[in-house]
Image: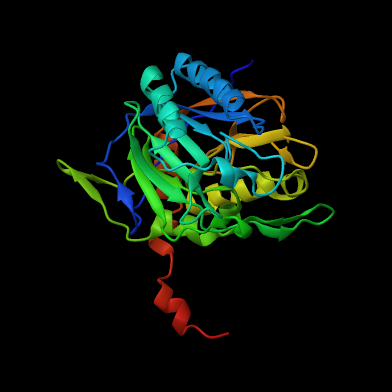
Amino acid sequence: MPVNVIGRIYTRLLLPRFCVSGESTMPSNSVRVAAAQMTSINDLAANFATCSRLVKEAASAGAKLLCFPEAFSYVGAKDGDSVSIAEPLNGPLMNKYCSLARESSIWLSLGGFQEKGSDDEHLCNTHVVVDDTGEIRSSYRKIHLFDVDVPGGRVYKESRFTEAGKDVVAVDSPIGRLGLTVCYDLRFPEIYQLLRFQHGAQVFRGDLSFLLRYVLLVPSAFTKVTGEAHWEILLRARAIENQCYVIAAAQAGKHNEKRESYGDTLIIDPWGTVVGRLPDRLSTGIVVADIDLSLVDSIREKMPIAKQRKPIDFWKAASL
């Protein structure tokens, strides 16, 4: 399994208003991250074995954070199957993934875990961040649910068995502050703008002030049709417009007779350049990139969009 080590980035980001977990951990000038690509099936043990292997590969490559795609632990054979295996975040399945992080001393982004919902008919599509000691640092419940009639494809109705989240969530990590999203959120730029621009507080260290660094995480299971049309374009747009590093771990290939994911796990820098991608869009493996913290600093100094943005009241008062 090939491991790509390419790309360098600096992030120097602003504070969101909502649900920030943990104390700030400022990274050094370079830190290594990884993103996984896999084809999950309706077998919890088989998916866990794949994830365990990828965790070990990422840790051996020196990554501080490994990001998994949406539905990493399970993809049902039919709609609603995931409800039957959903667990609370302190349940035995998530505990096994926490143990993986602890045993390999690596942070994990577990994007799209089937968390038990408020009743037996629903679950939450939950992005969980686990630190290198195996502790859950934060979790985000997917806000935008995939209720879509895919052109040339099937009809999806995620809201039939999934409860929508309500909170925008960020968490501090060794590579900076992570902005948590899941899959279909990618089509709604407002959540990323909140993570990047809301309340531009500064953090002071000694005589120097600097903005908290941000990385936007987009674990996904894009359909083949929508992925071919929009996946890379949307990811690069989110990176460019927010001047942020984006890590997009993806499901890939055929999960069963009815469901196929586009794949193409990507790591993108704040200029919109793809700095990490697997050679095979459908293969199982990891891509690794070294983040150089000087790039974002340079981009933001030369194009200071955070200072130039108009407040929401400006747009409320503006007329066509």
Q: Is residue 49 above or below residue 125?
A: above
Q: Residue at position x 60%, y 53% from top?
A: 184
Residue found at the very far right of the displayed protein = 152
Task: Write down the quadrant of residue 306 in the picture.
Answer: bottom left
Residue 276: give x, y in percent of width and height: 59, 30
> Going by the image, does 150 lie left or right of 215?
right
Q: Nearer the viewer, residue 37 or 10?
A: 37
Q: Is residue 170 above or below residue 64?
A: below
Residue 206: give x, y in percent of width and height: 14, 40
Q: Nearer the viewer, residue 87 or 236?
A: 87
Tell me how many marks there are: 0
> Going by the image, does 130 lie left or right of 53?
left
Residue 42 in view of the camera = yes
Query: Where, quadrant-wise, is the N terminus in this rendering?
Result: top right
> Going by the image, does 153 lie left or right of 163?
right
Query: Where, quadrant-wise, is the C terminus in this rendering?
Result: bottom right
Task: Write down the quadrant of residue 292 in the picture.
Answer: top left
Q: Residue at position x 63%, y 50% from top?
A: 234
Residue found at the very far left of the displayed protein = 206
Q: Nearer the viewer, residue 10 or 42?
A: 42
